[in-house]
Amino acid sequence: KSHILTLMAVPRARLPPEVAEDSSDLEFWRSESWVQLWSGQPLNLPPPGSAADLVRRALLPGSKVDFPQITEICDLVGGSFPQEGPEAIKVLVTAMRDKDVPFRKKLKALTITNEMLYDERAVLGFREMPGLQPALANLRAVKDSGLSEYVDENLRMLATEVDKVCFSESGGARGHASRLRNFGQSLQKNLEVAAGRLRGDVAS
């Protein structure tokens, strides 16, 4: 007696009417998390305060990615890469790879990724992630995202830069830029120390 195995396609989630376009629930309804839940897998959220958690929160709808946020993420990843780096990279690549993720979230992911590429270990981590290069190829060709031509241009530019650093023959971490960045941080710290001493001199 023959048996025919019928393969069921994973359903594409439709937004419930109560979920607004700017709701944080969109992270669930427009991500691979929906597939996990539908197939009975538990949702695995990163530990609070980890680099992956900071990335996840930065990518939420309504959250604005700024320099202090990115610096905190990069410092956590750089300070303890084996513990912090891979999971943070996974969250970013998932956002860039998932076809149902809004372009606004992909732009945030590209922005954070671009700043993490000063670390050679991060570059290798991104390079080893399945599906990243095809995802970048799609983002390099984005047109009519529904946001604006300026946003489309930034998506293409950042995707091209990430692809160049991670996958081109001349790619690799931005060593010279990294030294300049460290120099700028050191200079800022020295200025703060000098300002503190000046205030102490004035007070005395």
Image: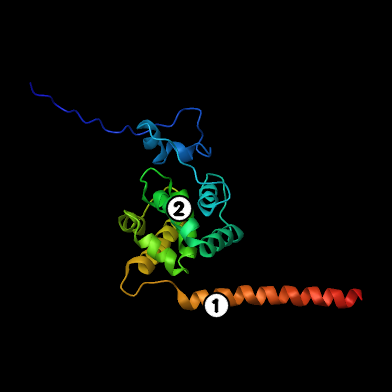
Q: Which residue occupies 46% across, 63% down?
A: 114
What x and y, as percent, mark residue 76? 55, 60
What's the amino acid at mark 1?
Leu
Circle 1 sits on which residue? 180
Q: Earlier in the sequence, mark 1 or mark 2?
A: 2
In the figure, 16 relative to 68: above or below?
above
Q: Relative to residue 36, is residue 157 depicted above or below?
A: below
Residue 163 horizontal/vertical position (percent): 36, 64
Q: CA distance from mark 1 to mark 2?
A: 27 Å
38 or 161: which is nearer to us?
A: 38
* Neighbour tally class for label 2: few under 14, some 14-19, many 20 plus, Cα within 10 Å: many
How packed mark 1 is, by other alpha carbons closer than 10 Å (few <14, some 14-19, many 20 or more), is few
- Identity of the residue drawn at 32% across and 32% down: 11
Q: Quadrant of the N terminus?
A: top left
Q: Nearer the viewer, residue 51 or 70?
A: 51
Name the image quarter holding the C terminus: bottom right
Q: Is residue 187 left or right of residue 150?
A: right
Q: Name the residue that disc number 2 marks.
A: 87
Residue 148 drawn at (x, y percent):
46, 53
